[in-house]
Amino acid sequence: MLDDKAVRAIREDFPILDQQLHGKPLVYLDNAATTQVPRCVVEEIARHYATDNANVHRSVHTLSSRSTKGLENARETVRRYIGAASTREIVFTSGTTASINLLASMWAARLRPGDVVAVSALEHHSSLVPWQQACARTGASFEVVPLDAKGDVDLAALEKLLARGNVSLLSIAHASNVLGTVSPIKEICNLCHRYGTVVSVDAAQSTRHETIDVCELDCDFVSFSGHKMCGPTGIGVLYGKAELLESLGPVMFGGEMVDKVRFGESTFEDIPIRFEPGTPNYVGAIALARAIDYLEDVGRESISVYEHFLVGEVEKGLKEIEGVRILGAPVMRAGCVSFSAEGLHPFDIASFVDKKGVAIRSGNQCAQPLLNEVYDDGSICRISPAFYNTQGEIEECLAIVDEVIGFLRRIG
Ligand code: PMP
């Protein structure tokens, strides 16, 4: 596990952390929303624009070759990071939301009335609404797999649904951005495949602290975002098994993704370029690859163990604050802990906590169905540490949350 000295050294890589907010040192604990970016990633973006910038895949000139090489090397870095069999399986998008929308639009072409698309009850809107809309357009049914009392996906209910034999696809988060539930993706993929159901995994929350080996887990599709793993915004990935991607037709058209274009008809490129029309965010992809190198330098296992420890500390500390309700108690929790305090508005808690220099999230966390229809708790606060947070910061945050809750109760 990362020790104090290692974490202090890591913090040096993140210039943003070294600042005061409202006269207090910043404590950034909203990493489930966006992680901070290490200096090497910022420098990589600047370096590319300063020395290598040109459009990719289009020209023979040297700068274009450098940009193209950077993009394709980035594809290889992503492939290696998630254990994909081939770079043909790595589609660059603008983020998880774009990846799932792209997949849902393409998958809709094969949905018919009588087919089912299932999502778990803990999905982020991005892993739910695109499928809900695909079903509405095609007449397929949209089904929700419930959670058990602890906030884990109910696998018995899932199997019952799969046994109907008409579930085309399951959309499921690897790690929940609200409950922190880490779902047993390998088991779920095995189960789904037994019934001929394809699995789309939303890995937005898990790529930093869980190891994702798509071959080992046997996922069919995986979506994730650069900005939740120390990369920049505006870049993400849709991984798909080659044979599945090959079976899908493009839904966005334009430059690069075509093979031959005639006034009468067009043919399209091979995967993955078929799904990357127009100028891709090649600088974002190159910067994401740098972020991956950085995470690997710190050590994936070390990050995972340390972040699990910090989340455990958050959970333990919140349990000691009177009147705090922690959402869920899943078998395995990672990344974040969400809570509410009876009679108090999460917006007020997060605003007063911010005045003490501590950034935590409040709101519906883009999971309205989970909060309104499962937990009856429309809005919550969420604390989500990353590997550059210290144990001291967690203690400080918990003390401030305790103090703010006490204060808000007093002023009633
Ligand atoms: N799924 C989950 C579980 C998330 O936490 C998020 C981001 N909060 C998303 C999807 C959407 O990611 P993005 O906004 O980067 O597209």
Image (cartoon, helix red, strand yellow):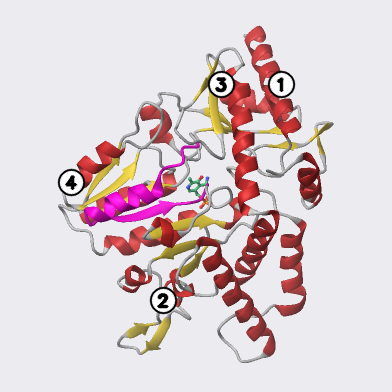
> Quick one: label 3 or label 2, which is nearer the N terminus?
2
Placement of 142 over or under 244, stated as above or below: above
Please name the amino acid that badge 2 sits on.
Ile
- Disc 3 to disc 4, C-alpha distance: 42 Å
In 3D space, how far apart are the residues under numbered discs 4 and 2 (Cα atoms)? 32 Å
- Indicate the secondary structure of the residue bearing disc 4: loop
The mark closer to the camera, 4 or 1, is: 4
Please state which amino acid type lies under the numbered disc 3. Answer: His
Residue contact between numbered discs 4 and 1, judged by CB atoms under 8 Å: no
Instruction: Please rate how many residues cluster around mark 4, counting C-alpha atoms within 10 Å: few if below 14, some from 14 to 19, many from 20.
Output: some
Element type where label 2 sits in the image: loop
Give the foreground label among 3 and 2.
2
The region drawn magenta spans 180-205
Place of residue 153 in the rendered image (x, y in percent of width and height, measured from the top left): 36, 37
Q: Is residue 214 left or right of residue 279?
A: left
What is the C-alpha distance between the residues marked 1 and 2? Answer: 52 Å
Assess whether residue 174 is covered by the magenta stretch. no
Say which residue label 4 marks.
Answer: 163
Mark 2 — residue? 271
* Rendered-image quadrant of the N terminus: top right
Kindly identify which residue carries mark 3.
345
Determine the CA span between mark 1 and mark 3.
Answer: 18 Å
Give the image location of residue 213, x and y in percent. Answer: 48, 58
